[in-house]
Image (tube, rainbow, N blue to C red):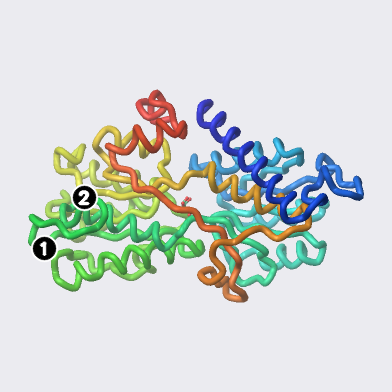
Amino acid sequence: MKKHMIAATMAGLLAISMAGCAGDGAGGSGGNASSDTSGTVDKSSITIGVAMPTQTSTRWIADGNAVKEGLEKEGYKVDLQFAGDDIPTQTQQIDQMITKGEKLLIIASIDGTALTSQLQAAADAGIKVISYDRLIRDSPNVDFYVSFDNYKVGVAQATSLLYGLKLTDKDGKPAADAPAGPLNIELFAGSSDDNNAGFFFDGAMDTLQPYIDKGTLVVKSGQTDFAQAATLRWDQAVAQTRMENLLSANYGGNGEGLAGVLSPFDGISRGVITALQGVGMGPSLAEGLPVVTGQDAEIASVALIDQGVQWSTIFKDTRTLADQAITAASAYLAGDEPEANDTKTYDNGVKVVPSYLLPVITINKDDIQEQLIDSDYYTEAQVKAGQ
Ligand code: GAL
């Protein structure tokens, strides 16, 4: 973790110095707070509220820490809160941030539709709100959105499933010696109250549907609707139970004939894998474990990929996402507008929220060294230890 943190800090510093340059360019001599011509802005008097959903997933801990460290390096105070995946806890935390007079909020919501009154109170107090990775819905008071290209994440997950089933190459190009099928798969989606979950599932289904239409892929349970596949709160135990039920109802209780599982998140993947191994499958891919995808490159799943158990994950570099949030926050606090690279896709039900979307990388066993270890996201020791 230490190496990760140092890298996150360095990445943060880079973003800060870049933000400083951008501010100077756009705003002339008044580009950032410390060089404000009025000379009155003291960053250390500004607290930024950072609301993260949960600490049960290592990715959100990494996100929270990276945002906090980066903002503190820039001179701001930070109030970082995790809400234990409990909606009332998160609304209360945000209420308190507003009452305490915090100047800007960075929020990764639990239920994207549950924060309307908090965001109204923030707007009334002149507090800018940055929606972090998950879009906050049904509110005109979301100022900016930083995330990854969530539809493309779904495409990447499905493409990785096709690759694992030897139907395509890694880039999704049909394989010359592809099996004719039919190959049985099952589908998992994320939490239905998270705006991202629909994007992931849509991207995945648009990619898988042609194979389902041809009969090459068969969802034996018939559970192909988002609502049937959804996993409330992205919960590992919920996913494990659903997979166990799918196995007993459709695969003779021992998984026979199941070739792959679309999973949108590493926690769900680990629940699915536990269920598969629990009925005697595998325990590794080489020993017949079905192909299971994932997302977030959580260390526990990267270790499983390294061991040949989980097939893949989608790496979303939390350092770059934190950097974007810090860049956007710095722009607002300097009186500027953050730069968006997408102003069309993310309609939150009330308005299209200007967004900055980052690219993602698919990780198989062969990619761990270059993408995760060489980039200092994890050390080799962490990958071996799984923590
Ligand atoms: C989503 C996020 C994913 C994953 C999931 C579960 O909102 O985009 O990367 O982290 O939540 O935490």
Name the residue carrying label 1: 182
Q: Label for residue 164?
A: 2
Q: Is residue 157 left or right of residue 101?
A: left
Closest to the observer, 367 or 275: 367
From the viewer's perspective, is the residue at label 1 or at label 2 nearer? 2
Under tag 2, what secondary structure? helix
Q: Is residue 122 left or right of residue 266?
A: right
Q: Which percent across, then down, holds residue 226?
A: 37, 68
Amino acid under disc 1: Pro
Q: Which percent across, then down, holds residue 137?
A: 59, 68
Q: Which percent across, then down, holds residue 51?
A: 65, 50
Residue farthest along the bottom direction in this orientation: 350
Write down the quadrant of residue 281 in the picture. Answer: top left
State whether residue 158 is above or below residue 36.
below
Disc 1, ligand 1: is the CB inside 8 Å?
Answer: no
Q: Residue at x 46, y 64 (%)?
A: 192
Q: Residue at x 36, y 35 (%)?
A: 370
Closest to the observer, 37 or 255: 37
Under tag 1, what secondary structure? loop
Q: CA distance from mark 1 to mark 2?
A: 15 Å
Disc 2, ligand 1: is the CB inside 8 Å?
Answer: no
Residue farthest along the top direction in this orientation: 381
Q: Is residue 221 left or right of residue 42?
A: left
Closest to the observer, 285 or 330: 330
Q: Residue at x 29, y 34 (%)?
A: 306
Closest to the observer, 237 or 269: 269
Amino acid under disc 2: Gly
Write down the quadrant of residue 139 in the picture. Answer: bottom right
Q: Label for residue 204?
A: none
